[in-house]
Amino acid sequence: MNRKKLNDWNSGTAHRILRRYPDGFIGYQIQGERGKGKSMYAYKVMAKVYMAIYNLDEYEAYDMALKYMIFSPNDLINLIEYNIKHDVITPVICLDDATVHFNSYKFFVDLYEVVLLKGLFDTIRTAITSVLITCPNRKQLLSFLRAYDDYKIEIKSAPGGDNYDRYARCYQFNWYPDERKYKVIVPFQDKYSCYVPGSKNDLTSPYGAYMAKRKKYLSLINEKMKKIMIEKEKRTGRPSVDPREDLSL
């Protein structure tokens, strides 16, 4: 099996999303150390889903997956509102780098946006079949996002493989009726390659296009955070601390 090729790769995550589309819902939280391949796993799962549903080739599937890699709360709000208005169901989206773009500090700097997003999440099942959330640690996420993880996926390096090989182990937490105890089930484990075709210098390739989009949104949030810190310093007369220092970035 060539796990670098979508056609040859079997994914338990993609399989479960396809089973629930279009009438069900399933959420995954993808965790792991920085640089371990969380985003590439989500990217490949999404591409696999879109390839299967729309009969796309590999590059077309990655292109559609990238469209639904969400780095901005405003983009997510627009997508949900559009889907509800036009009776459209998107198979799968990813809130990538969620502790950067959907962290709990947004409650203090964009309260209206957070309230609107929370309200829309109550109806997300009518607009989206699956939400993937990539983050190092769920604790810094907006509180209502922590409830949208039917499954937790942990990314680990695969011993004995090449530098691209990873394991994505899925955990399901089944709570007992008293909600005090639960048992952990491991329904599947994906072995995958975090290789995605292309290079960061080739913006027409799946990998290059992803890196360009990610860099664009990180630059936007950096500029916004600088403005917030400058305004706070003017208001308080004291040097402000970048809140992202607490986000394990």
Image: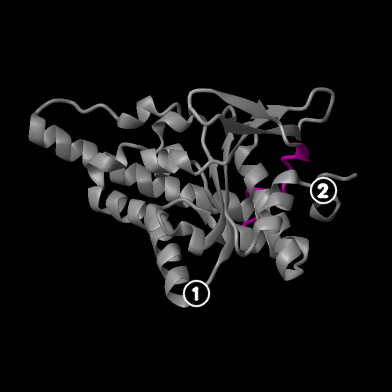
Residue 29 located within the stretch drawn in magenta:
no
Asked which quadrant contains residue 58, the reply is bottom right
Residue 151 seen in the current view? yes
Q: Measuring 68% from the left and 30% from the top, which residue is drawn there?
A: 185
The residue labelled by disc 2 is 9
- Going from N to C along the chain, the mark reached first, 1 or 2, is 2
Q: CA distance from mark 1 to mark 2?
A: 32 Å
The one nearer the camera, 12 or 229, is 12
The reply to whether dot 1 and dot 2 touch (C-beta < 8 Å) is no
Q: Disc 2 on helix, strand or loop? A: loop
Q: Amino acid at mark 2?
A: Trp
Q: Measuring 48% from the left and 23% from the top, which residue is drawn there?
A: 180
Q: Disc 1 on helix, strand or loop? A: loop
**Measured from the top left, where is residue 141 in percent x and y?**
41, 37
Give the residues in magenta.
189-203
The one nearer the camera, 163 or 111, is 111
Q: Is residue 120 left or right of residue 207?
A: left
The residue labelled by disc 1 is 87
Label 2 Cα neighbours within 10 Å, binned few <14 / some 14-19 / many ≥20: some
